């Protein structure tokens, strides 16, 4: 029987973390790890009675907490949950049942009503559509932090994970890249308890960068080729216009064609670098 390790990153989550203490009753044999990411409230005191607490001396980020928990975990199956009260302990069983069907990664996919705001829902919808196009598989929730995974596979990709909030994106795309089996289970999440750590301006830029991370983690050439083709078309249209107008090939057309070639070559080089990263680690 596989041993279960439940990992909960927590930074100043004293208001929501207590709801997860029921995990000890639901899964008495499981190893429960709370990574206290430099909290300044009672997060540690609330977690100590029912979980193993690992302290960060200062805040290192959500992704860093995930990596700390994964390195310390001894289970064959890892469960990742947020400590803010959004994820329901009862849903762990749903994800475990799905994994028993032969999957390596199972993600709790949030419904539209579970999204924090309309803007967040629109952003996540775009991410899901874009990433689904990249991997040619349906991705229902790219950024959900509620997921279970086979420990041996997850520890293979720890070197790829960022210290910030985009670890779900990185891990999902890496699993697709490695050819592991990924599935989703629909869940409803509760409103967050406590103050969000999301900053609108800072994390707005971060979410934009996620789009490029998705492409570079899976297939850079698939991302860069359409952009290159767009500049090629713009250069061609410009050339046709100036040729009909004055019979000239202008510098702007040359710039567009050069840009198209440069972008394509960047994508080609990135594709080779990505392949080397994965191949080197597998060997």
Image: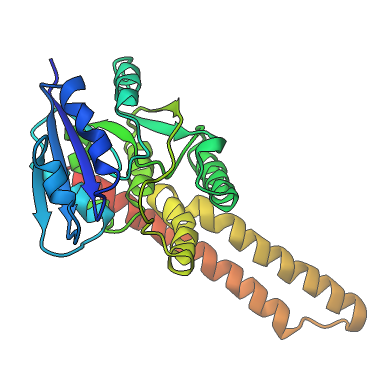
Does residue 261 appear in the picture of this structure? yes
Q: Position of residue 275 (x, y in %)?
A: 33, 49
Query: Measuring 41% from the left and 47% from the top, which residue is drawn there?
Result: 218
Indicate the quadrant where residue 25 lies: top left
Query: Measuring 37% from the left and 39% from the top, which residue is drawn there?
Result: 86
3 or 209, which is in the foreground? 3
Q: Position of residue 188 (x, y in %)?
A: 46, 31
87 or 206, which is in the foreground? 87
Colouring rule applied to residues: rainbow
Q: Is residue 190 above or below residue 161?
A: above
* The N terminus - image quarter: top left
Query: Measuring 9% from the left and 42% from the top, which residue is drawn there?
Result: 48
Q: How many numbered discs, if any?
A: 0
* Extreme residue toward the right, this view: 245
* The C terminus - image quarter: top left
Does residue 80 appear in the picture of this structure? no
Q: Position of residue 68 (x, y in %)?
A: 14, 49
Q: Is residue 178 above or below residue 24?
A: below
248 or 42, which is in the foreground? 42
Query: Measuring 58% from the left and 53% from the top, which residue is drawn there?
Result: 119
Q: Position of residue 19 (x, y in %)?
A: 27, 35
Q: Is residue 206 above or below residue 243?
A: above
Q: Is residue 8 above or below residue 201?
A: above
């Amino acid at each position: 029987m596989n041993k279960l390790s439940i990992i909960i990153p927590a930074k100043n989550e004293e208001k929501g973390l207590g709801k997860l203490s029921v995990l000890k009753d639901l899964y008495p044999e499981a190893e429960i790890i709370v990574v206290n990411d430099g909290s300044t409230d009672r997060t540690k005191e609330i977690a100590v009675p029912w979980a193993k607490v690992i302290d960060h001396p200062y805040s290192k980020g959500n992704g860093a907490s995930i990596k700390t928990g994964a390195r310390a975990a001894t289970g064959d199956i890892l469960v990742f949950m947020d400590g803010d009260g959004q994820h329901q302990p009862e849903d762990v069983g749903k994800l475990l049942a799905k994994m028993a069907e032969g999957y390596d990664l199972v993600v709790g996919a949030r419904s539209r009503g579970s999204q924090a705001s309309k803007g967040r829902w629109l952003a996540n919808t775009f991410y899901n559509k874009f990433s689904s196009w990249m991997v040619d598989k349906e991705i229902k929730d790219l950024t959900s932090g509620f997921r279970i995974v086979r420990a041996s596979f997850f520890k293979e990709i720890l070197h790829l994970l960022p210290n910030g909030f985009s670890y779900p994106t990185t891990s999902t795309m890496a699993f697709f890249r490695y050819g592991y089996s990924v599935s989703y289970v629909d869940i409803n999440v509760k409103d967050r308890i406590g103050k969000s750590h999301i900053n609108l301006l800072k994390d707005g830029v971060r979410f934009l960068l996620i789009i490029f991370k998705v492409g570079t983690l899976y297939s850079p050439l698939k991302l860069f080729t359409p952009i290159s083709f767009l500049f090629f078309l713009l250069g061609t249209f410009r050339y046709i216009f100036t040729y009909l107008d004055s019979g000239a090939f202008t510098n702007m057309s040359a710039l567009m064609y050069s840009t198209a070639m440069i972008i394509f070559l960047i994508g080609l080089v990135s594709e080779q670098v990505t392949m080397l990263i994965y191949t080197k680690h597998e060997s």
